[in-house]
Image (spheres, rainbow, N blue to C red):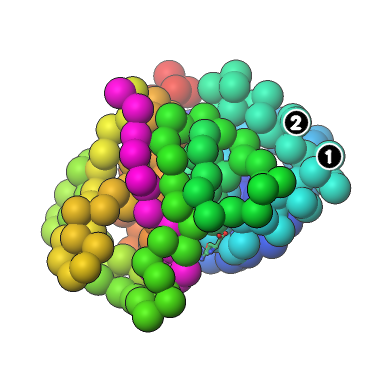
């Protein structure tokens, strides 16, 4: 059965995620209102600005329903700002920044510093076969620490940040620091669709 996967569409690179989902055989749906969560098999939280998304989620009355949906087991994939939204703990955010949470991890916002705020590099990711992904990092977070239930899927391979965690999974929640939706490589979305289907059956 074709899964229907939402993309939180308050801000950020929504179109690219919808296109990537369609390419790997899911039906995509923009989500701006609570009612649009109905019947979803999974949801993507896109890149953008996590503080802005936090404010908009509250303003649109989406934050609590989303938290409830994740709490009830709705699979989610967060890229970049979306990774921050799935983190239980955030460093270097404003004091009033809240997340949806769900992944037992601490993320550091804009972690790669000013000099290398945006960069690209190869990333080997567990669960993604066929060679390294082309990782596009844009003012990206990294994962500072993870709890025991979190599977580390990828780390930065070279340079000053070598060893930093940039992809994780906890149950049916998946998160990457980088933006696979910008590369035309559908393998991370494919992995997410597999996670969604595992829950459907
Ligand atoms: N720096 C952004 C934040 O903290 C994330 C950037 C991105 O999603 N490309 O939300």
Q: Quadrant of ligand 1?
A: bottom right
Q: Residue at x 81, y 35 (%)?
A: 35
Crowd class of label 1 (few under 14; some 14 to 19; many from 20; radius 10 Å): some
* Residue that label 2 marks: 64
Figure check: 137 above or below 1: below
Whether residue 138 is visible, yes or no, is yes
Count of picture labels:
2
- Per the image, is 80 magenta? no
Q: Quadrant of the C terminus?
A: top left
Q: Residue at x 40, y 70 (%)?
A: 113
The front one of 127 and 115 is 115
Residue lying furthest bottom in this view?
115
Q: Which residues are magenta?
A: 137-148
Q: Going 29% across and 49% down the picture, which residue do you hit?
A: 165
Residue in the image at 47% along x and 23% along y: 200
Whether the residues at callouts 2 and 1 have beta carbons within 8 Å, the answer is yes
User: Residue 160: x percent and y percent?
Assistant: 21, 68
* Residue identified by numbered label 1: 61
Q: Quadrant of residue 163?
A: bottom left
Q: Is mark 2 within 8 Å of ligand 1?
A: no
Q: Where is residue 66? Give x, y as percent.
A: 68, 33
Residue 137, image quadrant = bottom left
């Amino acid at each position: 059965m074709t899964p229907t996967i939402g993309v939180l569409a308050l801000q950020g690179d929504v179109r690219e995620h919808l296109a990537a989902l369609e390419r790997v055989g899911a039906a995509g749906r923009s989500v701006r209102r609570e009612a649009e969560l109905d019947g979803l098999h999974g949801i993507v939280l896109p890149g953008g600005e996590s503080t802005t998304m936090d404010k908009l989620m509250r303003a649109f009355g989406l934050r609590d329903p989303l938290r409830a949906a994740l709490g009830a087991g709705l699979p989610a994939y967060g890229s970049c700002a979306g990774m921050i939204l799935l983190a239980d703990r955030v460093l270097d955010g404003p004091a009033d920044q809240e997340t949806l949470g769900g992944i037992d991890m601490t993320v550091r916002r804009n972690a790669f510093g000013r000099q290398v705020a945006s960069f690209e590099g190869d990333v080997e990711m567990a669960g993604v076969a066929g060679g390294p992904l082309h990782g596009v990092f844009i003012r990206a977070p990294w994962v500072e620490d993870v709890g025991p239930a979190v599977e580390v899927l990828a780390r930065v391979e070279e340079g000053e940040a070598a060893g930093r965690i940039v992809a994780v999974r906890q149950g049916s929640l998946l998160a990457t620091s980088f933006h696979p939706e910008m590369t035309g490589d559908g393998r991370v979305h494919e992995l997410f669709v597999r996670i969604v289907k595992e829950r459907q059956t």
